[in-house]
Amino acid sequence: MSQVGIIVGSRSDIEVAQRAAAVLGELEVDSEIRVISAHRAPDLLGRFVGGAADRGIGVFIAIAGLAAHLPGVVASQTTLPVIGVAMPGGVADGLDALLAIVQMPKGVPVAAVGVGNGENAALLAAQILAVGDPELRGRLVARRAAQARAIEEDPANEGL
């Protein structure tokens, strides 16, 4: 049963989706990736989003560049949390896509992470799911502790 639905608007964005899925996998969170354009396949997108809760999806990650409408369209069709990831490129190397994601109208929120940062989107999705899952929360705490340990053990920090 999937807990995070990852949607990319174009196959060219699949690498960011795969990096997000890898982080989720490390945290033992199921995910599924779909390539569905909000503009070219709106009915398919509606079917995927509409049946998500019944399939066990609790959070969406929507990855899009250029006009970056995908996260907003997903959010317009569900009350589940949606995390938008803007892709680099376009006239402002992803800034235009990021602004499109964060400037949603009142009543249709979309969270956003850094341009191209599927890893942080996955971590945020896991944190949302961890609110109701103490075991997942424990895995997130352990991951953070391991991050800190790796920095502390870096030879460049010897003697601190």
Image: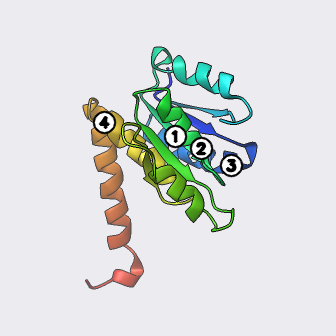
The C terminus - image quarter: bottom left
Which secondary structure, mark 2?
Answer: loop
User: What residue is disc 3 on?
Assistant: 13
Q: Write the residue at 47% across / 34% down.
A: 75
Query: Which label sits in the foreground, 3 or 1?
Result: 1
- Crowd around label 2: few <14 · some 14–19 · many ≥20 (10 Å): many
Compute the Cα span from label 3 to label 4: 27 Å
> Mark 3 or 1 closer to N-term?
3
Say if residue 117 shows up in the picture.
no
Compute the Cα span from label 4 to label 1: 24 Å
Q: Is 79 or 8 nearer to us in this picture? A: 79
> Mark 4 or 1 closer to N-term?
1
- Crowd around label 4: few <14 · some 14–19 · many ≥20 (10 Å): some
Compute the Cα span from label 2 to label 4: 28 Å
> Mark 3 or 2 closer to N-term?
3
Q: Amino acid at mark 1?
A: Gly
Say if residue 132 shows up in the picture.
yes
Quarter occupied by residue 9:
top right
Q: Position of residue 107 (x, y in %)?
A: 36, 37
> Mark 3 or 4 closer to N-term?
3
User: What residue is disc 2 on?
Assistant: 69
User: What residue is disc 4 on?
Assistant: 130
Circles 3 and 2, Cβ within 8 Å, touching? The answer is: no
Q: Position of residue 99 (x, y in %)?
A: 51, 58
Which secondary structure, mark 3?
Answer: helix
Position of 36 with respect to 83 (left or right) is right
User: What residue is disc 1 on?
Assistant: 72
Q: Amino acid at mark 3?
A: Asp
Query: Which label sits in the foreground, 2 or 4?
Result: 2
